[in-house]
Amino acid sequence: MTENNLNKIWANIESDLSLDFQETNKVALTKAINNLPVYSASDKIWKQIDSRIHQPKIKFFSSRKMSIAASIVGLLGIAIGFLVWNHSSKINFYAVKATENIDLMSISDTSTASFEKIKNATCQLKPNYCSSDEFKNLTKQYDELINDQHRILLQSKISDDENLQQMLLKIENQKKEIQQQMIAMVD
Amino acid sequence: MPKYSEIELIEGCKNGNRIFQKILYEKYCDAMFTICKRLLNDEELACDAMQEGFLEVFRSIQSFQGNSTVGAWIKTIIIRRALLIGKRFRMFDEFDLKQHDKIIHWDSNLTGEELELAIKKLPEGYRNVFLLIEVEGFTHKETAELLGISEGTSKSQLYHSKKMLQKSLAELKN
């Protein structure tokens, strides 16, 4: 920096140090300040604040998701209908794989309960299949997945982490795979 | 809509009552939005400051002790938030090295609209100090604290802001 610039800066500092400036007709400024325009906040600001304050911890529900959930529950219902009772030894049931972010909390409970009913009914009819080591191993894996799912569901109640929903979806699909393996064994 | 006292509003908000939150918001939203818009000189940033600021208000309202009016408390929160947002987009203020005369004269015909236009042209640092002191009524000490500057800088910035306003207003008139 040149000496000239340094001198200018110092002159400015010196000037600011003795800021005893005078204002004349300040009433005009006060009047203008009092007449400054007031701006209206748009409605969208409140909507966004409101949604952020009161947003539910778990936001799984939507009409589309509900319709997917209803379809899956419907399919399970049909499967139960076929199973209870199809008098032939062939069991007509298949597991539905979840491919989207759906309301896993309600669906997993429904599908798990439905599958348990089917499994129990099948095992009563065909105890040999259910007592095999392979079937027991699958049952164990299935139960572990249910426990994991419950643990994540509890965690999702206190966290907005979107990864939790992905984990739930993954577990749900793993459950479906095991269900299909179990069905294939009995079939 | 029924009228509620300030105490009732605060209690309602402390209980997380959405209706009371809305009433409190509506009571102060335009004034706060005006402050944000002037400080940030940008409508979108002002909306961000309003959202973040009022969220902070509702989330921290349990800590409101009533040592000041709720309006003053909200104003401080909103201004802090707006200044924080402004920092993310801060540009360097121009520093005028010219010597100034120490007399500032305000035109008797100065209108609010003209002043508003001139305020918009101020660099951020000058604009903040002018708005906080002259428009919002904060002291140099309070302004210095809000902006994280010294009282001397606040005084200096106020003087320079007024000189720049005069220059802008003169250009507007011509």
Image (spheres, coloured by chain):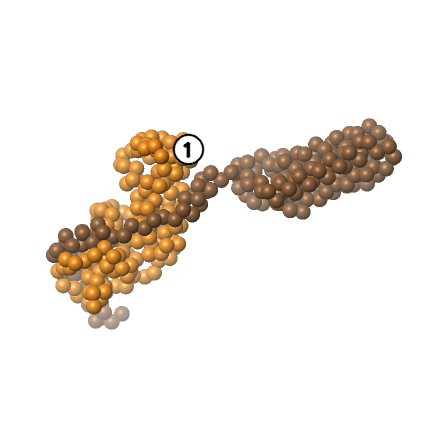
Chain colours: A brown, B orange
In this rendering, the count of numbered labels is: 1
Q: Is residue B4 above or below residue A46?
A: above
Residue B13, image x, y percentages: 38, 34
Q: In this view, does A154 lie above or below A102?
A: above
Label 1 sits on a secondary structure element that is: loop
Q: In which quarter of the image is residue B103?
A: bottom left
**Residue drawn 62% across and 37% down?**
A105
- Name the quadrant of the N terminus of chain A: bottom left
**With A126 as the anchor, is B38 left or right in this view?**
left
Residue B82, image x, y percentages: 34, 50
Residue B33, image x, y percentages: 33, 48
User: Looking at the image, can residue B139 be seen?
Assistant: yes
> What chain does mark 1 sit on?
B
**Residue drawn 33% across and 35% down?**
B64
Residue placed under numbered mark 1 in the picture: B17
Q: Nearer the viewer, residue B68 or A60?
A: A60
**With B30 as the anchor, is A35 left or right in this view?**
left
**With B40 as the anchor, is A168 left or right in this view?**
right
Residue B37, image x, y percentages: 33, 53
What amino acid type is highlighted by mark number 1?
A: Asn
